[in-house]
Amino acid sequence: MLSADKQSRTSFLASLSGCRGALIVMGMFSALINVLYLTGSFYMLQVYDRVIPSRSVQTLIALSVLAGVLYAGQAALDFFRSRILLRISRSFDERLKPPRVRAHRTPAANGRRRDGHTAAARS
Protein backbone atom coordinates (compact mmCIF):
# COMPACT_ATOMS: atom_id res chain seq x y z
CA MET A 1 0.00 0.00 0.00
CA LEU A 2 2.81 2.38 0.84
CA SER A 3 4.49 1.63 -2.46
CA ALA A 4 1.32 2.46 -4.40
CA ASP A 5 1.02 5.74 -2.50
CA LYS A 6 4.62 6.65 -3.32
CA GLN A 7 4.11 5.73 -6.96
CA SER A 8 0.96 7.85 -7.26
CA ARG A 9 2.71 10.77 -5.55
CA THR A 10 5.67 10.42 -7.91
CA SER A 11 3.42 10.36 -10.99
CA PHE A 12 1.51 13.37 -9.67
CA LEU A 13 4.69 15.38 -9.12
CA ALA A 14 6.04 14.36 -12.53
CA SER A 15 2.81 15.48 -14.19
CA LEU A 16 2.83 18.71 -12.23
CA SER A 17 6.44 19.48 -13.15
CA GLY A 18 5.54 19.00 -16.82
CA CYS A 19 3.08 21.89 -16.53
CA ARG A 20 5.29 24.11 -14.35
CA GLY A 21 6.12 26.72 -16.99
CA ALA A 22 2.52 27.15 -18.06
CA LEU A 23 1.37 27.41 -14.45
CA ILE A 24 3.92 30.15 -13.76
CA VAL A 25 2.68 32.11 -16.77
CA MET A 26 -0.90 31.63 -15.54
CA GLY A 27 0.15 33.01 -12.16
CA MET A 28 1.44 36.13 -13.87
CA PHE A 29 -1.78 36.42 -15.90
CA SER A 30 -3.77 36.14 -12.67
CA ALA A 31 -1.66 38.80 -10.95
CA LEU A 32 -2.18 41.20 -13.86
CA ILE A 33 -5.93 40.51 -13.90
CA ASN A 34 -6.09 41.19 -10.16
CA VAL A 35 -4.39 44.55 -10.69
CA LEU A 36 -6.87 45.35 -13.46
CA TYR A 37 -9.73 44.70 -11.03
CA LEU A 38 -8.76 48.02 -9.45
CA THR A 39 -9.74 49.92 -12.61
CA GLY A 40 -13.16 50.93 -11.30
CA SER A 41 -11.76 52.18 -8.01
CA PHE A 42 -9.06 54.24 -9.69
CA TYR A 43 -11.58 55.57 -12.20
CA MET A 44 -13.87 56.84 -9.46
CA LEU A 45 -10.92 58.25 -7.51
CA GLN A 46 -9.80 60.24 -10.56
CA VAL A 47 -13.34 61.43 -11.30
CA TYR A 48 -13.74 62.80 -7.79
CA ASP A 49 -10.22 64.26 -7.65
CA ARG A 50 -9.91 65.73 -11.16
CA VAL A 51 -13.20 65.89 -13.06
CA ILE A 52 -15.62 67.21 -10.46
CA PRO A 53 -13.45 70.07 -9.14
CA SER A 54 -12.44 71.23 -12.63
CA ARG A 55 -15.74 70.32 -14.40
CA SER A 56 -13.66 69.12 -17.33
CA VAL A 57 -15.65 67.04 -19.81
CA GLN A 58 -12.51 66.21 -21.81
CA THR A 59 -10.88 64.67 -18.73
CA LEU A 60 -14.02 62.66 -18.02
CA ILE A 61 -14.08 61.35 -21.60
CA ALA A 62 -10.38 60.49 -21.52
CA LEU A 63 -10.73 58.66 -18.19
CA SER A 64 -13.81 56.81 -19.43
CA VAL A 65 -12.06 55.68 -22.61
CA LEU A 66 -9.03 54.57 -20.61
CA ALA A 67 -11.22 52.64 -18.17
CA GLY A 68 -13.06 51.01 -21.06
CA VAL A 69 -9.80 49.92 -22.68
CA LEU A 70 -8.55 48.53 -19.37
CA TYR A 71 -11.80 46.60 -18.85
CA ALA A 72 -11.57 45.20 -22.39
CA GLY A 73 -7.97 44.16 -21.72
CA GLN A 74 -9.03 42.49 -18.50
CA ALA A 75 -11.78 40.59 -20.29
CA ALA A 76 -9.35 39.44 -22.99
CA LEU A 77 -6.75 38.31 -20.44
CA ASP A 78 -9.40 36.48 -18.44
CA PHE A 79 -10.67 34.74 -21.59
CA PHE A 80 -7.20 33.62 -22.65
CA ARG A 81 -6.34 32.56 -19.11
CA SER A 82 -9.41 30.34 -18.91
CA ARG A 83 -8.64 28.75 -22.29
CA ILE A 84 -5.01 28.07 -21.37
CA LEU A 85 -5.98 26.69 -17.96
CA LEU A 86 -8.45 24.37 -19.67
CA ARG A 87 -5.68 23.04 -21.92
CA ILE A 88 -3.35 22.63 -18.94
CA SER A 89 -6.01 20.71 -17.03
CA ARG A 90 -6.66 18.40 -19.99
CA SER A 91 -2.95 17.74 -20.36
CA PHE A 92 -2.59 17.13 -16.63
CA ASP A 93 -5.57 14.76 -16.69
CA GLU A 94 -4.15 12.80 -19.61
CA ARG A 95 -0.81 12.40 -17.86
CA LEU A 96 -2.41 11.09 -14.69
CA LYS A 97 -4.83 8.67 -16.32
CA PRO A 98 -3.93 5.02 -16.25
CA PRO A 99 -3.16 3.62 -19.72
CA ARG A 100 -6.25 1.40 -19.63
CA VAL A 101 -8.58 4.37 -19.16
CA ARG A 102 -6.73 6.35 -21.83
CA ALA A 103 -7.16 3.53 -24.36
CA HIS A 104 -10.86 3.22 -23.56
CA ARG A 105 -11.52 6.94 -24.06
CA THR A 106 -10.11 7.14 -27.58
CA PRO A 107 -12.80 7.31 -30.30
CA ALA A 108 -11.31 4.49 -32.35
CA ALA A 109 -10.95 2.07 -29.43
CA ASN A 110 -12.05 -1.39 -30.54
CA GLY A 111 -13.60 -0.01 -33.74
CA ARG A 112 -16.27 1.84 -31.80
CA ARG A 113 -17.31 5.44 -31.99
CA ARG A 114 -17.79 7.61 -28.93
CA ASP A 115 -21.52 6.88 -28.84
CA GLY A 116 -20.77 3.14 -28.44
CA HIS A 117 -21.95 1.97 -31.87
CA THR A 118 -19.61 0.17 -34.21
CA ALA A 119 -18.63 1.81 -37.48
CA ALA A 120 -20.17 -1.07 -39.50
CA ALA A 121 -23.57 -0.74 -37.82
CA ARG A 122 -23.87 2.87 -38.83
CA SER A 123 -26.11 2.34 -41.86
Image (cartoon, rainbow, N blue to C red):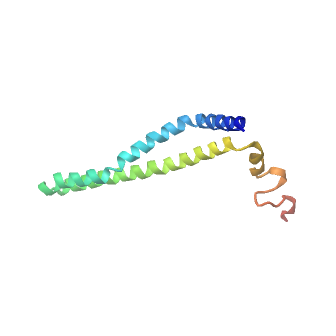
Residue at the spot x=49%, y=38% of the render? 25
Direction from residue 32 to residue 113 in the image, left or right? right
**3 versus 29 height, above or below:** above
User: Which quarter of the picture shows residue 44?
Assistant: bottom left
Q: Nearer the viewer, residue 59 or 114?
A: 114
User: Which quarter of the picture shows residue 40?
Assistant: bottom left
**110 versus 121 height, above or below:** above
Residue at the spot x=76%, y=52% of the render? 107
Direction from residue 14 to residue 29 in the image, left or right? left
Q: Residue furthest bottom?
A: 123
Quadrant into which the N terminus falls: top right
Q: Residue furthest left?
A: 53
Q: Position of residue 55 (x, y in %)?
A: 14, 57
Q: Position of residue 102 (x, y in %)?
A: 74, 46
Quadrant into which the C terminus falls: bottom right
Residue at the spot x=79%, y=51% of the render? 108
Q: Residue furthest right?
A: 120
Q: Position of residue 75 (x, y in %)?
A: 42, 52
Q: Nearer the viewer, residue 89 or 122?
A: 89
Direction from residue 52 to residue 39 in the image, left or right? right
**53 versus 31 height, above or below:** below
Direction from residue 43 to residue 74 in the image, left or right? right
Residue at the spot x=67%, y=35% of the render? 6
User: Which quarter of the picture shows residue 65?
Assistant: bottom left
Q: How many marks?
A: 0
Q: Position of residue 19 (x, y in %)?
A: 58, 37
